[in-house]
């Protein structure tokens, strides 16, 4: 019998690679495949970037991935989550991120993507997620990150974009989805990440935000997304990335968080769950790996805390990363 590795102290690296690669084989007959069908583009980004962190990008079939992404581009330039769905900013960013990771951005008409994103900006600087008009700081992030990655931030009004994000800042220095909405770590990542990308971190109350973010750590070592909530591995990204951007990563107990993430690994199937003992999924696998990478454990590939893309991918694009050099 093979010796079992203690997953509370070790990263099950090979099992996680296998777990992600196998997701691609779970197709038509699988219930999970169909309930997440509309999320295929995002799922692909989580899986692929997870493999990047594990230094195993070569395990995926590049041509198949590119063909799928191209099949999701609509005539207006936007990308959908799957072939028969409508285009959206969330999936357009994922498509651009994946194409950059695969070094295949030249396969698309960049101008059409830029136009799609730019036309979603509103007079107050906010962004619609798609033609239906929902506004959310997630969409500000997607638009800003996407245009920055494509080298076309000149196509939007950065002054009003920053002013809208600033209106979503609360008394506790965290950020919500729209002005007046409760601070949430996920939204805080989007706002701090977007402001970092457009070089407007002067708008962030760094120390107060750092305090709010490090208060997200619970006695079990894990992080929650807002006060009185339980811990969840995905906040190892949303909270940590914001702390990294404002250079306050050392304000939380890194070792305790590492142990919490490792406890969420599934030592049979590979993959990481939201909480210890739960069933793993690709979303939490990706964000758990991101957390470990940001904290510098296990010699993983470095992920950039603002762009949520590999540092090497960004450097190839000539994007300078002042906040990342401190890792
Ligand atoms: C490129 C990484 C990346 C992101 C793109 C989609 C997006 C931009 C950002 C999403 C930010 C966000 C709002 C994350 C939070 C996701 C989450 C776990 C929501 C759960 O909310 P609740 O209320 O959970 O169900 P809590 O933990 O508060 O109970």
Image (cartoon, rainbow, N blue to C red):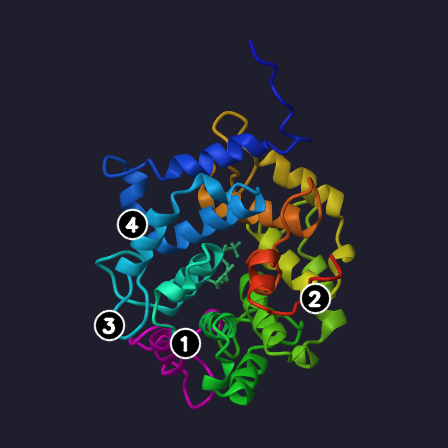
Q: How far across and how far down the image is residue 224, in percent?
A: 60, 53
Nearer the observer, 96 or 47: 96
Magenta region includes residue 115: yes
Question: What residue is disc 1 on?
Answer: 135
Please state, as top left, top right, bottom left or bottom right, where the C terminus lies in the image: bottom right
Residue bounds of the magenta highlight:
111-138
Side of 126 relative to 206 (left or right): left
Q: Distance between the residues labelled 1 and 4?
A: 24 Å
Residue that numbered label 3 is attached to? 75
Q: Residues within 10 Å of mark 4 (few under 14, many from 20)?
A: some
- Sequence-first disc among 2 and 3: 3
Q: Quadrant of the N terminus?
A: top right
Q: Do the residues labelled 3 and 4 touch (CB within 8 Å)?
A: no
Badge 2: residue crowd in 10 Å (few <14, some 14–19, many ≥20): some
- x and y percentages locating residue 201 in the rendered image: 67, 77
Q: The residue tagged with tag 3: helix, strand or loop?
A: loop
In the image, residue 251 lies in the stretch drawn in magenta: no
Q: Which of 231 and 144 is in front in this view?
A: 144
């Amino acid at each position: 019998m093979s010796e079992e590795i203690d997953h509370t102290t070790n990263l099950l690296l090979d099992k996680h690679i296998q777990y992600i690669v196998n997701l691609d084989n779970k197709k038509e007959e699988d219930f999970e495949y169909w309930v997440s069908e509309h999320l295929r583009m995002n799922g692909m980004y989580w899986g692929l970037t997870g493999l990047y962190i594990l230094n195993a990008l070569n395990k995926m079939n590049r041509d198949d991935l590119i063909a799928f992404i191209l099949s999701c581009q609509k005539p207006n330039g936007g990308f959908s989550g799957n072939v028969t769905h409508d285009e959206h900013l969330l999936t357009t960013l994922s498509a651009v991120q994946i194409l950059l990771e695969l070094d295949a951005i030249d396969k698309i008409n960049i101008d059409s993507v830029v136009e799609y994103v730019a036309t979603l900006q509103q007079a107050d600087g906010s962004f619609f997620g798609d033609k239906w008009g929902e506004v959310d700081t997630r969409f500000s992030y997607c638009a800003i990150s996407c245009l920055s990655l494509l080298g076309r931030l000149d196509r939007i009004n950065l002054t009003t974009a920053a002013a809208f994000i600033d209106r979503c800042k609360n008394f506790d220095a965290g950020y919500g989805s729209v002005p007046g909405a409760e601070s949430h770590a996920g939204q805080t990542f989007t706002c701090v990440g977007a402001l970092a990308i457009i070089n407007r971190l002067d708008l962030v109350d760094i120390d107060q935000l750092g305090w709010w973010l490090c208060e997200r750590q619970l006695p079990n070592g894990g992080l929650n997304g807002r006060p009185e909530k339980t811990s969840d591995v995905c906040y190892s990204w949303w909270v940590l990335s914001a702390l990294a951007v404002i250079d306050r990563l050392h304000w939380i107990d890194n070792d305790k968080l590492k142990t919490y993430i490792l406890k969420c690994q599934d030592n049979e199937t590979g993959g990481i769950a939201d909480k210890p003992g739960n069933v793993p999924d690709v979303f939490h696998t990706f964000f758990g790996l991101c957390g470990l990478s940001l904290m510098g454990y296990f010699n993983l590939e470095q992920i950039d805390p603002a762009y949520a893309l590999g540092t090497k991918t960004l450097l190839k694009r000539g994007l300078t990363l002042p906040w990342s050099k401190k890792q």
